[in-house]
Amino acid sequence: MTQVCFAGRWGRLADRYSSRVVMAACIPFIRWANAGWLFLRLPEPHVFTLPLLAAIQVATGMAMSGMRLAVANVTLKLSPSTHAHIYAGVVDIVAGLAGAIAPIAGGWLADFFIQQHFEVIVSWTGPLQSMGFHVLSIQGLNFVFLIAAFCGAITLQCLNLIDEPGGQSQGLDATYRGVQPTG
Amino acid sequence: MAYGVSFAFGLALGLLGIAAIASLPDPPLAADPERRGLGSLLTLPFKDRRFRPVFIFVSCWSFVNHLATPFFIVYMLGQLHLSLGTTMLFTALSQ
């Protein structure tokens, strides 16, 4: 639902600035959404679990629509017109291979971290009463979400390598750290 | 039975999608003046120095995206103890 609603807005932004700007705006959303999964259980589901999950899903959908659009745009912009279909196809093959390896790696990581547990507890002890609550409780799959959020930073850096023709990204580059003007 | 009906419904919509795509106008592609073979065509983008960063970015992005995404539904069902209906509702929200 979110992707349908936001695709047009990202399209207008890509037309006005560049696809790199759209990607630079979307990747942090994905990173924060991945990090948000860490707070859904503390260590059990809590009163904010469902509202937070809804916010995460909206942010993910919003960013995914922008990324799909921008990746396709950049591919077509950088492809020679006579071979654009070949270039787009090979990009999909490469993305597919990386996308096939990733869940296997994620599964291995989840298996490795299944017995590990990291938690941050804030507690107050007084003469009359003591209280404490979890601020963070990371276990099993949470570690995979955390690693994915960190890896998002590498993706953002890789964006600097792309030299998009006709991109007017310099105005917004200062807003999104990590994206350096090209050329 | 319920899953079977869902899969059949998905298949029917998929076939409808193929029919819809087939009806789209499809301008013919420009002929390759050098008449390369398939292998040569598939390696062509890798020889393009300006295009290589796109591969680095796309493979990185695809890896990061698929590292966590397949486990979201597993997490909702197994860790958050949500029902299948609620899980699908949240999944649809991000589509």
Image (cartoon, grey):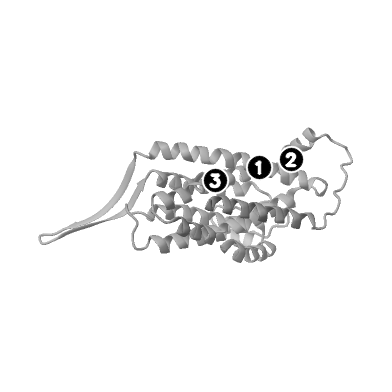
**Separation of residues labelled 2 and 1 (CA atoms):** 9 Å
Marks 2 & 1, CB-CB < 8 Å contact = yes
Task: Write the residue at 38% across / 55% down.
Answer: A39
Task: Write the residue at 69% across / 57% down.
Answer: A167
Using the image, tell me which numbered label, if any, was put on residue B66.
3
Of labels 3 and 1, earlier in sequence is 1
Element on which disc 1 rests: helix
Pinpoint residue B22: horizontal percent, then vertical percent: 78, 54
- Residues packed near mark 1 inside 10 Å, few (<14), some (14 to 19) or many (20 plus): many
Pinpoint residue B75: horizontal percent, then vertical percent: 43, 49
The answer to whether residue B63 of the structure is visible from this angle is yes
| Mark in the foreground, 3 or 1 | 3
- Residues packed near mark 3 inside 10 Å, few (<14), some (14 to 19) or many (20 plus): many
Pinpoint residue A108: horizontal percent, then vertical percent: 46, 36
| Mark in the foreground, 2 or 3 | 3
Using the image, tell me which numbered label, if any, was put on residue B55.
1
Type of residue at label 2?
Pro
Q: Share a chain, discs 3 and 1? A: yes
Type of residue at label 3?
His
Type of residue at label 1?
Phe
**Separation of residues labelled 2 and 3 (CA atoms):** 24 Å
Q: Quadrant of residue A140?
A: top left
Element on which disc 3 rests: helix
Q: How many labels were placed on the picture?
A: 3
Of labels 2 and 3, earlier in sequence is 2
Left or right of B95: which side holds A164? right
Left or right of A32: which side holds A64? right
Q: Which residue is mark 2?
A: B45
The disc numbered 1 marks a residue on which chain?
A: B
Task: Write the residue at 43% across / 40% down.
Answer: A110
Task: Write the residue at 44% across / 38% down.
Answer: A109
Left or right of A31: which side holds B48? right
